[in-house]
Amino acid sequence: MMNILLPTDFSENSRNAAAYAMQFFKDTSCNFHLLHVLDAPAEKMVTGFMTMPGDVQQKFNELLAWLNQTRTNPNHHFHISFKVNYLIEAVRSQVLEKNIDLILMGTKGATNKQGVVIGKHTSDVMRKVKCPVLAISENAVFKEHKEILFPTDYKIHYGSRMLRTLLNLASLSNANVKILEIFNSEKEPSPEQAENRNFLQDSFSPKVPVLQTFYASKEQGPRKVFMANRNVDMIVLAAKNLNLCNKFLQNDQDDNIPFINQLPLLVLHG
C-alpha cells in the first residue's frame, strides 16, 4: 500500500491536487495523509497551542466528507494531521513517521500571487525534503499519463533509488518516457555525461526511452522545445538539478508559459 502525503491549506489548488491524487492512483491501494501546518516560531510552540483549532477541524471535516464522497476506490484511506511547526520540518517529520512514498501537493497555495508558476512553499518542499514530490497545477485536469518528458543535461548521476518513483508512476498507465537531452554546445556530451546517459537509458530497459536533443542557444528558447512536445502529460526533474527548472519555468520573452502551467511536475530525490 502506498503512503502519500497531501499537504493542504484548504485552498482550491490543494483540493484539486487531492482530487488528482485519487484519480492518478485510482487502481492502487493508498493511505492519503492530509497535513495542515500552522507555520509558527518556536516560542509559540507551547502546550495547548498544539491542539487543532476548531475552525481547522471543521475544514478537515468538510474536506474528508468531500474526499469520501468523491473516491472510487474503497482501498483509499484518509488520515489527518495538524502541526504547529515550520513547514519543512513538519513535512520531513511526516515523511519519516508515516513512511511516505510520495508527496503530492499544489504548485501554489492561497497566499501566492497571480502569475507565479510554483509557489515558495512548494518550491521549498521540492528542494529541501528528501522525498519525491509531484506538484499539481491549479489548471491541471487529470488524464492518463501516456508520455512523460524528462529534461536532463546528464551532469548528475541518476541512481536506481532516484528513478524508482518515476518507473513506478510510469508503469501505472504504461507511459512512455521521452528524455530531452540539453547540451550547451556540440562539444557535449563529455565522457562523464555519456556515462550518465548510458546508465539512465539502461535503467528503462527493456522499454527504451525516446531521445530528443536540444542545444541551448539564444536562437532556440524553451517555448520551441515545448511546442514540439505538446502531447506530454508530465515533466520530471531531479532535485539535484533544479537549475534546469529555470530554463523552462522562466522565459525572457514570455512571463507565463501556459504549457507548463497545465502539467504535473515530478521532482526526484535520491
Image: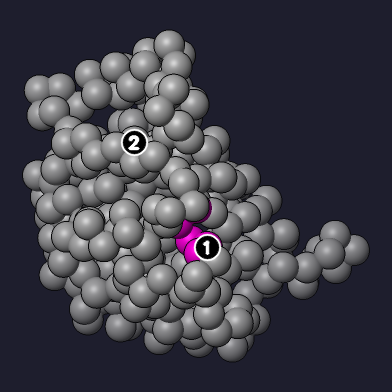
- Residue visible at 32% across and 69% down in the picture: 259
Amino acid at dot 2: Glu
Q: Residue 250 carries which label?
A: 1
Per the image, is 250 magenta? Answer: yes
Residue 138: percent from left, percent from top: 39, 77
Residue 241: percent from left, percent from top: 52, 38
Q: Alpha-carbon neighbours of circle 2 within 10 Å: few (<14), some, or many (≥20)?
A: some
In primary-sequence order, the first of circles 2 and 1 is 2
- Residue visible at 62% across and 55% down in the picture: 124
Check the image and report above or below for 184 versus 160: below
Q: Of 1 and 9, which appears nearest the observer? A: 9
- Residue visible at 37% across and 62% down in the picture: 223
Is residue 149 at least partly visible in the picture?
A: yes
Is the N terminus in the top left, top right, bottom left or bottom right quadrant?
A: top left
Q: Of 235 and 87, which appears nearest the observer? A: 235
| Farthest residue, direction right | 43
Residue 180: percent from left, percent from top: 31, 41
Check the image and report above or below for 201 versus 241: above
3D distance between C-alphas at marks 2 and 1: 18 Å
**What span is colored magenta in the figure?**
247-251
Amino acid at dot 1: Gln
Tag 2 secondary structure = strand
Q: Alpha-carbon neighbours of circle 1 within 10 Å: few (<14), some, or many (≥20)?
A: some
Which residue is under mark 2? 181
Q: Of 178 and 70, which appears nearest the observer? A: 178
Does residue 20 appear to the left or right of 79 in the view shown? left
Magenta segment, prevailing SS (helix, strand or loop): helix
